[in-house]
Amino acid sequence: MIAAVAETIETGDAERLRALAGDLHEADLGDLIQALEPDLRPGLVELLGSAFHFAALTEVDESVRLQILEGLPTQTIVDGLRELDSDDAVYILEDLEDEDRKKILDRLPLPDRAALVRALDFPEEAIGRLMQTDFVAVPPFWTVGRAIDYLTELGEDGPETFYEIFVIDPVFRLEGTVSLDKLLRSSRTAQLKTVLNDEVRSFEALEDREDVARQFQRYNLVSAPVVDPENRLVGVVTIDDIVDVIQQEADEDLKALGGVFGDEELSDTVRETARSRFPWLAINLCTAFITATIIGLFSDTIERMVALAALMPIVASMGGNAGTQTMTVTVRALTHRELGRRRIRWIISREMLVALVNGVALSIILGGVAAAWYRNPELGVVIGTALIINMVVAGLFGALIPITVHRLKFDPAVASGVFLTTATDTVGFFAFLGIAAWWFGLW
């Protein structure tokens, strides 16, 4: 399929290209764009013409989207954006340079331009950036029958997809909603004010999108109205946008836990990827000197008992793994707002106890193996004791570091990993080498 599409673009056969890709869903079309060579992507858009749905550009990486937009005539972009819901149009426009964005907006009809400019004026993380400005709003004195007839008359001029109609007063203040299933099941003569739901969960346009997504998830919402500070209806946010938010936030947290900053994507170049990862690696390099200093304190001990050099990485790595487990659980709990003051003490105590239980079990195994391997039972006792100490410390710091970072108003997913690694390595090496030096009289 990809080879056939590439060949068709190179030959300029628009009719064959429409037969191959014209009926693809926007998500599948996005995958096809990603798979094509960069120089062929703008050609795909131009050859498909009206058969190309610009919503497919919301399904590709940012770098791919920008590369395509740079290769297209401004009028082609304008025509494509006019066919989109306002939230998708904003998603495409927000990453463009101000000058390029202005050229496109200036060619849009005034009503469309005003709606997009207003949405782009909201902060990037505000739910106002995601809302659709196309919705159905009617007065409370209308009957159900009149509302249904109005929806029929709207036809394709109304929103492409919606789940409820909004009931507003003369100054556009939200009074309630009527879901489509209730609308169709009610008597045509009933007034909307008698069938509306006035216990509506609405969101102000400046609310953080992650908080809104959490409430969608908590209360099983499908759509929700967006209002201004005076409770006037300005838009609607739907579940498809919220799913994207949840996925983006989870993706950011996953990358942050691995020390990957920014919006790194698979389509990024080697230079861009290396530049985004270097800062965190540099920080890790600096903290590694702390561990190296601890090992340097026991250089004489290691020289006199070479077995210590072979075994000490085990203690540090086991502590690191245990700490990462605790840190992952704690960061998730903080992200989902599950840790109140009472539960903080509970999770720290629980994680330390879990680490102690696992540490004792693993120390028996490790101590036995070390004693048999080096034929030195005392060495088994030393490494087993050090492992228990480091595991318990890992449980403590794995919970305490993310909580502290969160209290300091930083992202715990971003900042916790490097501190945890330093703590477990330092404590692990110090405990093992220190106990060994004391036990065997080497220091």
Image (cartoon, rainbow, N blue to C red):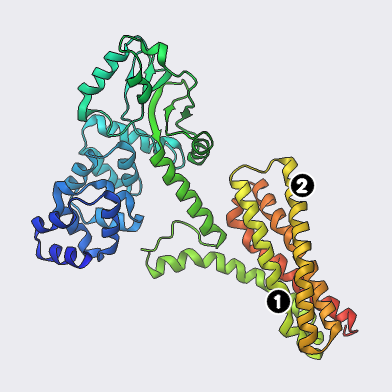
Instruction: Give the image quarter of residue 167.
Output: top left
Q: Is residue 371 above or below residue 284?
A: below
> Label 2, on which residue?
345
Q: Residue at x 41, y 15 (%)?
A: 195
Q: Around disc 2, counting alpha carbons within 10 Å, would you say few (fewer than 14), some (14 to 19), or many (20 or more)?
A: few
Image height of 171 relative to 392, above or below: above
**Residue 412 percent coordinates (x, y):** 61, 52
Total marks placed: 2
Tag 1 or tag 2, which sits nearer the N-term?
1
97 with respect to 276 (left or right): left
SS for dot 2 = helix
Q: Is residue 186 above or below residue 67?
A: above
Query: Disc 1 on helix, strand or loop?
Result: helix
The x and y percentages for residue 279 are 54, 65
The answer to which image quadrant residue 62 occupies is bottom left
According to the picture, the residue beneath numbered tag 1 turns out to be 314
Image quarter in which the C terminus is found: bottom right
